[in-house]
Amino acid sequence: MHQHGHNDPNAKKLYELIKDVKIAMMTTVDTDGTLHSRPMYSQEVDEHGDLWFFTQIQSPKMTEVSRDNEVNLGFSDPGSQTYVSVSGKAEIVRDRAKIEEKWSEPLRAWFPEGKDDPQIALIRVHPSKGEYWDSPSSTIVHLYGYAKAALTGQQPNPGDQAKVNLS
């Protein structure tokens, strides 16, 4: 389904892990060279593996992405002990048909004028690489692992971790 990462067997798992995480922290490079992060409401991954986010045209992130389009996305689901980092290139999309396609009513909380708001745009992120950490979510499993580590002197197994090539 996803073209990004077609050569890496861990890509499918990475996309599966972020499928239900609705908020991602998007990090961009600010105009003074420092990193700037903010929460963004994530749309469904498209058939190419690109990640989509709605934004206001008059926002600092638009200036930052226009100047340096390298971004990082951090996804976190502490309840399931799932953490994902994705880096790639961002692209500003102002295509009204794409805005219409991606629009859903819960977005009205951020865009009161709706999908026809002239200040609305999309940011498409073309992933290049990612990394995930997928741990057992049960507190009992964690406690057992740490108790075993304390008794044996060996580090606990925190779960699956993989670097993923998404280009």
Image (cartoon, rainbow, N blue to C red):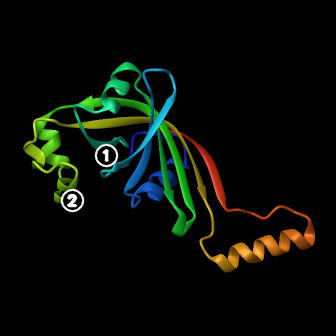
Image x and y of residue 22, in percent: 37, 57
Observer-nearest of 3 and 124: 124
Question: Residue 133 occupies which quadrant of the picture?
Answer: bottom right
Tell me the kind of residue under disc 1. Answer: Glu
Callout 1: 10 Å neighbours few (<14), some, many (20+)? few
Instruction: Point out which mark residue 47 bears.
Output: 1
- Disc 2/disc 1 C-alpha distance (Å): 23 Å
Image coordinates of residue 42 in percent, x first then y, are 34, 50
For image coordinates 65% across by 58% down, the residue present is 160
Q: What element carries label 2?
A: helix
Residue visible at 30% across and 51% down? 43
Query: At x 21% / y 56%, what residue is drawn?
Result: 109
First reached walking from the N terminus: tag 2 or tag 1: 1
Q: Is residue 104 above or below residue 141?
A: above
Q: Nearer the viewer, residue 163 or 148?
A: 148
Query: Is residue 81 visible from the viewing direction of this image?
Result: yes
Residue 166 picture location, percent across and down: 49, 38
Q: In x, y percent, where is residue 77? A: 50, 62
Q: Which mark, by number, is residue 164? A: none
- Establish if 150 lies above or below 114: below
Q: Is mark 1 on a helix, strand or loop?
A: loop
Question: Which quarter of the picture shows residue 119?
Answer: top left
10 sits to left or right of 56: right
Are dots 2 and 1 in contact, CB under 8 Å? no
* 34 and 100: which is toward the camera: 34
Residue under the point 44% across and 26% down: 30
In the rendered structure, the answer to whether residue 77 lies left or right of residue 111 reads right
Considering every residue shown, the one lying at the far bottom of the view is: 140
Query: Which labelled disc corresponds to residue 106?
Result: 2
Q: Residue type at mark 2?
A: Pro
Closer to the eye: label 2 or 1: 2
